[in-house]
Structure formats: C-alpha cells, structure tokens
Image (spheres, grey):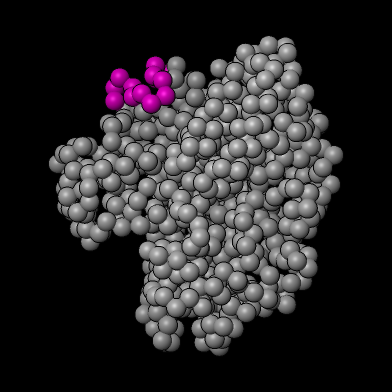
C-alpha cells in the first residue's frame, strides 16, 4: 500500500491544511485505510503536526489508521433499521464470516462493522458496502452481496436513487416539486421547469436588499430543526463589514430516520446550486461550500455534475449571466461524524479539523468559516428559495399558517403502512398524516407512540397525536418538529429496547469534547442495558433522570443537550414499562437482548 503517491493526492488539493479531511478521504478510498507512513507524509506535505493528522483520522468513522478488508460491510444500527431487524442480519454476518464487529475475515476480503443512519430509512434495513448502500435487506440479499464480491462481479452495480419513496402527489409541492419528475442529471430538464429563472430574476432585476426582504417577508425558517428565520440570518451577514463572506449548505444529514435532504440532492441538485448562488448574491458572498455526508455518494456525484453544468451555462463562476456578480461552489465530503450536523462542528470540518463544536457567541452570520461572515442553511431550507424569489413572499405566505408558512418534508417510518417522504403544508394535523397519508398502523395493530423529529426530538403518546404541525403550537406543547422524522411504534415495541438503541447511537456519536456528554451518554447506555437485561435496580430510574437533566443543562452543544430527550420523554410517558423491567427482572415483551 505504501506505493500510493501521497504527493499526487496532496498536490491536487494544493497542499493546503484546510483540505486535510478531503485528502484523507481520497487516500482512504483507494485502500480502505491509511498507513502510519502515509499519515506522516501527509503531515509533512501540509506542514501540520502529526498529532493533528492522526487526531483527524481517528475522529471520523469513514477513516481508519488500521488495515481493513477489501470490502467494509457496515450494517445500519439506527432505530428504523433496528426496528426492521438489522441486529439479526448483523448476527447472521458474524456467523457467516466467522468474525465479530471490527474484525476482518480470514481471506482478508470483509471487515464487519455497524454504523449509524445511512439515510435510506424507508427501505430499512440497510447496509453500506464501501461506497454503495443497499436497502430492503434480508438474508438472501446479503448472501448475493457477499457472493458477488467473492467472485469480483460488482462492476454493473449502480447507485440507487430514492425517488420512489415520495408519498405525496405532484400538487402542492415546493421542495419536492421536481423529484421523480425530471432527470436530475439534465440541466435542460431543470430549466424547462423554471430552473435558474429565480437566479436570473434576482441578479438582474433585484438588489441584494430586495432579495433579502423577499425572504424575510416569506417568513421562511430553517428546516433543519432550529427554525431560525432565514431572512434574518441573511441580513446579519449582509450587514457584516468583514470579507470575504461565505455561503454554506449543511447537507450532513445524520439524524436517524431523516433522508429528506438526500432525496433533494439526488433528485433535484440544480435547485440547491441555484439557491446558493442567490444567497451569495444577497449577502455579498463570492464563495460557497456544500458539506455532504460521506455516506451520500450519489448525492455527491450529482451535485458535482450540477456544478459543472451550471459553470458551463454561466450560472456559476465569473460575471454570472453577464453581470458583475461572481460566485464559486466547492464540495466538502464528510467522513462520518454525526456531530458535524452542528453548524460550528461542520465549519471546523470544512477547515480541515476534527468536527468538534465551537463556543457561541460569536455566531456564524458575523464570524463563521475562518472567522468570516457565513450563512449556513440546511438543504431543505435552501430548496424553498428559488420558488420564493420567483413567485414572491405573498404567494408563499398563503401556504401553511400565518406564522408557520410554507411546507415541511416529513419522513414517515416504522410501524406504518406507507413509508417514505411526504411534503405537507405546515399546520397539517399529525393524526391526518398518520392515517390518511401513512395509511395507519401496520397489521391493524394499536399505536404505542410517535417519535417526532428523530432521537433528539419529541415523543407523543396516542392521545397526543391530534395536533397541528405548527412551530408555535408544538413549542407551546413542549414538542419540536426537528428534522421532520415521524417514526411510528406499535404496541409490540418495547420502550426500553428502543431507547437503549438510541442511547447506543448517542454514545457512539458523542465527539467527547465535554464531560457531561462523553460520560453521560456512556453511563445512560450502561444503565439501560442493565434494566433491559433484567438486572436493574429501583434507584436506576432516578439516576437516569438526574443524568439526563444534567446533560441538558451542562453539555457543550446541542448533541449533548438533546441526547437525553428520548430517555426523559419516555420516562414521563411510560414509567410503568421501565418499572416492569426492574420488578419482573426482564423484558415483559421478551424483546430486549444482549
């Protein structure tokens, strides 16, 4: 492996330290790990301490300083896949390959790992084999995947698009209006549906201030979870005097159960390119970064294509459409770290560092990437921009509610008949979504609870689901819409088992920067495991509650502050299930396993 020319890779990235993660990704793709000698050479080429390079390669799960097999099998262990039986498939692979997690088969072909969400939840369970993701897994499909690789016959396999998982019809869509309708690899088909018309209108007929006013008047708020007013964020950066300014698209979608951003990137990539150029014009930025999850290989491929096509037709680059405005876009590939969904951790990663969150203030709009003014918007948020500019804020305000305008893309998952993505006006009733669009609970079973917004979101019991998906209403009820996950759990599900799975996820994804999160996630998982296996004690529930409350108050960033949400919510809604596990010395539903 040492014959790989590291200088060739680093030269492609101008030997700049800010490109460290991209360089490590390129080396890793060629051989599935990076040798100590190669790490030293990278450090030398980039003029970095070896500790910085080693710290990066050990931080990201898609990088490794230790040898791995030719094919790395990563079984998804996130809640939707776990509910669909991924643990059984992991056990099957252990027995078939005669290895444990983290080990490599005797023939050197396969390394077996479990991984966090792969963003293909509507076809759970899923597996990632090197750079390809497969869903709807069963033992027969696993055997086919293994045997094809043993025979070396994988050249005809293609990336799979998620276009078939849209539940809503064509009417009423804004964000998903082109998904499944156009060829995402054709700029001409995008233009036939008014593509780049909003950009033309913005930079030729509107001033930057007018663009910002239109976005502010639309009342669009961030769709990633925080729900901060988008126009206000743009205005802060517009008013900042420091330069250069940056636009960043946060496409590091890692919340288990969320695949809305992937759907947009794969099926309508030009919309994101167009929106970012508009944002750049509005705030006075000439540079943009799209930070995409390393697991989203088809998204990366299609965004790269869209960028090149946009350059060819002068929608990107110098003097766009004959104006004085210039704007360039660069892709940054993530390397496997849920924490990089945090905007400050994402910026650290773009700068070539470990993705650890920064202290706020200062905030990105005035001091972000390289301490310069930076707008960071999530994919779904940006996907609203072209329609708002083209049709106007008044049009947008007629969709949804007075203060919660527009639509929201939800991902319906779990024990529901119809799984997939759906775009609905904000204010739509959750119960109607579950039973009219989702088709109700599978096999006619009773609803037990709904996870809203992902593991770090909120939980609703059956008597709580008759509620409007409106930011204000949800906030008053102590709930959050989050990233838009709607995970349905039926009467057969064990609350302790599900929450334990979520605790395992947060333990794995904690960046380790602060003690409350680093230690708290580990101890919560340990105690939940004790309870799940019938070894719990009466005082464990009080300990869990105390730990969760401390984490919410004392953790450094949003990951640690929201990691206990699943635990604390279910302790309040289903205390009897926790007590039964302790009193009966095991799981009443006989679901919890080692």
Residue 211 at least partly seen: yes
Image quadrant holding the C terminus, namely top right
- Position of 392 with respect to 31 (left or right) is right
- Is residue 262 placed above or below 305 in the rendered structure? above
Residue drawn 64% across the image and 19% down it:
531
- Position of 35 with respect to 132 (left or right) is left
For residue 421: magenta?
A: no
* Front residue of this view, candidates 390 and 528: 528
Residue 183 at least partly seen: no
Return the x and y of residue 60 as percentages of the image width and height. 38, 42
For residue 103: magenta?
A: yes
Residue drawn 50% across the image and 73% down it:
237
- Is residue 425 placed above or below 458 in the rendered structure? below
- Position of 587 with respect to 26 (left or right) is right
Return the x and y of residue 85 as percentages of the image width and height. 59, 27
Image quadrant holding the N terminus, namely top left
**Magenta stretch, overall SS:** loop
Q: Residues in magenta?
A: 96-108
Return the x and y of residue 549 as percentages of the image width and height. 64, 37
Residue 567, located in which quarter of the rendered image? top right
């Amino acid at each position: 492996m040492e014959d790989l020319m590291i200088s060739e890779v680093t030269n492609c990235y101008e030997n700049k330290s800010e490109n460290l993660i991209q360089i490590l990704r390129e080396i890793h793709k060629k051989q599935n790990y990076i040798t100590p000698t190669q790490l030293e050479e990278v450090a030398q080429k980039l003029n970095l301490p070896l500790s910085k390079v080693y710290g990066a390669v050990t931080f990201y799960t898609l990088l490794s300083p230790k040898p791995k097999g030719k094919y790395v099998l990563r079984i998804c262990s996130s809640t939707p896949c776990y509910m669909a039986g991924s643990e059984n498939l992991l056990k099957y692979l252990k027995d078939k390959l005669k290895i444990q997690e983290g080990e490599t088969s005797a023939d050197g072909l396969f390394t077996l790992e479990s991984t966090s969400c792969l963003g293909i939840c509507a076809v759970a369970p899923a597996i990632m084999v090197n750079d390809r993701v497969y869903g709807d897994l069963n033992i027969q499909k696993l055997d086919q995947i293994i045997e094809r690789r043993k025979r070396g016959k994988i050249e005809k396999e293609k990336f799979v698009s998620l276009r078939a998982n849209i539940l809503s019809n064509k009417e009423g869509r804004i964000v998903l209006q082109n998904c499944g309708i156009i060829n995402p690899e054709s700029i001409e088909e995008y233009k036939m549906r008014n593509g780049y018309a909003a950009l033309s209108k913005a930079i030729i007929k509107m001033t930057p201030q007018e663009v910002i006013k239109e976005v502010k008047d639309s009342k669009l708020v961030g769709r990633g979870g925080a729900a901060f007013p988008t126009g206000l964020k743009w205005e802060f950066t517009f008013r900042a005097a420091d330069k250069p300014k940056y636009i960043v698209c946060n496409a590091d979608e890692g919340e288990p159960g969320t695949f809305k951003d992937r759907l947009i990137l794969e099926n309508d990539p030009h919309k994101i390119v167009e929106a970012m150029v508009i944002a750049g014009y509005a705030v006075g930025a000439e540079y943009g970064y799209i930070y995409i999850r390393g697991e989203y290989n088809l998204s990366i491929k299609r965004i790269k294509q869209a960028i090149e096509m946009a350059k060819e037709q002068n929608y990107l680059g110098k003097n766009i459409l004959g104006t004085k405005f210039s704007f360039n876009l660069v892709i940054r590939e993530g390397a496997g770290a849920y924490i990089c969904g945090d905007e400050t951790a994402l910026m650290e990663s773009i700068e070539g560092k470990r993705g650890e969150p920064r202290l706020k203030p200062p905030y990105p709009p005035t001091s972000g990437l390289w301490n310069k003014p930076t707008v960071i918007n999530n994919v779904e948020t940006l996907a609203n921009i072209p329609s708002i500019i083209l049709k106007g804020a008044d049009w947008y305000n007629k969709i949804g509610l007075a203060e919660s305008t527009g639509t929201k893309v939800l991902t319906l998952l779990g024990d529901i008949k119809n799984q997939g993505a759906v775009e609905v006006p904000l204010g739509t009733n959750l119960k109607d979504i579950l039973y009219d669009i989702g088709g109700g609970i599978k096999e006619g079973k009773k609803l037990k609870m709904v996870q809203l917004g992902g593991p770090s979101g909120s939980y609703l019991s059956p008597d709580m689901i008759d509620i409007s998906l409106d930011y204000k209403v949800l906030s008053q009820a102590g709930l959050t819409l989050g990233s838009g996950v709607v995970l349905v759990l039926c009467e057969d599900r064990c609350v302790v088992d599900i929450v334990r799975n979520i605790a395992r996820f947060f333990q794995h994804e904690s960046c380790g920067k602060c003690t409350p999160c680093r230690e708290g996630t580990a101890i919560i998982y340990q105690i939940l495991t004790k309870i799940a296996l019938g070894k719990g004690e009466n005082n464990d529930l009080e300990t869990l509650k105390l730990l969760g409350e401390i984490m919410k108050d004392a953790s450094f960033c949003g990951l640690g502050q929201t990691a206990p949400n699943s635990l604390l919510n279910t302790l309040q809604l289903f205390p009897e299930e926790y007590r039964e596990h302790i009193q009966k010395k095991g799981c009443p539903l006989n679901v919890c396993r080692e």
